[in-house]
Amino acid sequence: MEAFDPAELPELLKLYYRRLFPYSQYYRWLNYGGVVKNYFQHREFSFTLKDDIYIRYQSFNNQSEMEKEIQKLNPYKIDIGAVYSHRPIQHNTVKLGAFQAQEKELVFDIDMTDYDDVRRCCSSADICSKCWTLMTMAIHIIDRALKEDFGFKHCLWVYSGRRGVHCWVCDETVRKLSSAVRSGIVEYLSLVKGGEDMKKKVHLSPKIHPFIRKSINIVEKYFEEYALLGQDILENKENWNKILMLVPESLHAELQQGFQKFHNSVQRWEHLKQVVSTYRSVRNEKFGQHIDWEIMLQYCFPRLDINVSKGINHLLKSPFSVHPKTGRISVPIDLQKVDQFDPFTVPTISQICHELDMVSSNEDDGDKENEAEPDTKRRTRDF
């Protein structure tokens, strides 16, 4: 794959925005068929330019105007915001308090850094194929709940370009939801709660909600391969002590004894399940009945940024924009192939611009028929 050099980004972006960015598909999505008058014209965009210059409240009359402005400004990053009561670019001319965010897709932002307390392979912005399984599980769990539990139909999942995924729920009724309702939906989808100082972040009641039960079914498919083999969460005393913090103290001695006797995480996990099962059958307590599930969920359940989802005026990185640190394109994820999605094979801007150069060179070596080709037709073919 063509290596990405951040120093080349300005020139690469010029080529990308001129010949490869899918403006027509992009406009068609955000215009939603033009059913609502001025829907696209009232949509906010923001641009991050070179040297971290940030411009908010950009808006456009049509696709052509958007194209010209993007090609003129050559943004390093594009974010999409809400549909407002007035054109965002005119927000300073509107009477104070009248300029209001009215609609936006329900969005979710899942970032790998939020799992740093439970992943051993990487930390911070780094990812690898082992911990990417967390994103795979997150997509399966959240997408199932959005469609089956809430009845939403149009969910677009997008790779962020670096270390996470975004979801855009685009149903017409969803775009009109209030901030309070959005908060309620995120609350429903959240199980891992508590800051850095809180050790145990998942507490299940005796009666398991169907959403949690179905989420556990998904986690169980990946748990051994991801947590016990890939992350090796019970590899040694340092790591199993973190697990012991999540179980009642009365079980620590028996678990410690067994952990020392067994030789790998798979065997130690089986031992934990047996001890917990015995504990469950002899204790009649309200809580602590689902200790093994609580551990699984703490290590594997999606961690959502509630502020991104509840705020109607919150902006989120646009699909098909380029990540300035990695050069990777924020590509949509095919839900039929979630398990096969590999962030390391996502094309970089260097790669696709190089491929475009190769095509152009081959054409130049042949006949010159394409010289008079209209720019829009050429760009469609390039794309």
Image (cartoon, helix red, strand yellow):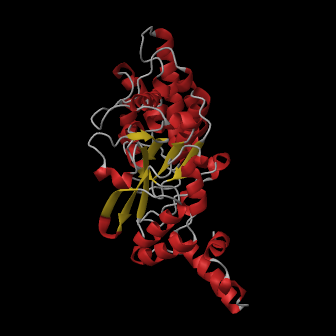
View extreme (top): residue? 284
Given residues 3 and 241, the one toward you in this image is 3
In this rendering, position of residue 337 left or right of residue 299: right
In the image, what residue occupies the spot 44% across and 32% down?
182
Q: Residue at x 57, y 31 (%)?
A: 145
Location of residue 48 in the rendering, given as x and y in whole percent from the top left corner: 36, 62
Judge by depth and name the residue closer to the eye, 350 or 229: 350
Does residue 168 appear in the picture of this structure? yes
Which residue corresponds to the image point at 72% horizontal and 90% vertical from the top-left? 366
Q: Residue at x 52, y 44 (%)?
A: 168
In the rendered image, residue 40, in percent from the top left (x then y), is placed at: 50, 51
Q: Is residue 114 above or below residue 355?
A: above
Q: Is residue 211 left or right of residue 48?
A: right
- The reply to whether residue 220 is in sight is no
Whole-percent x and y of residue 83? 44, 45
Q: Which quarter of the image is occupied by the C terminus?
A: bottom right
Residue 78 at x, y percent in the picture: 43, 59
How many labels sit on residues?
Answer: 0
- Work out whether 272 lies above or below 311: above
- What is the quadrant of the N terminus in the image? bottom right
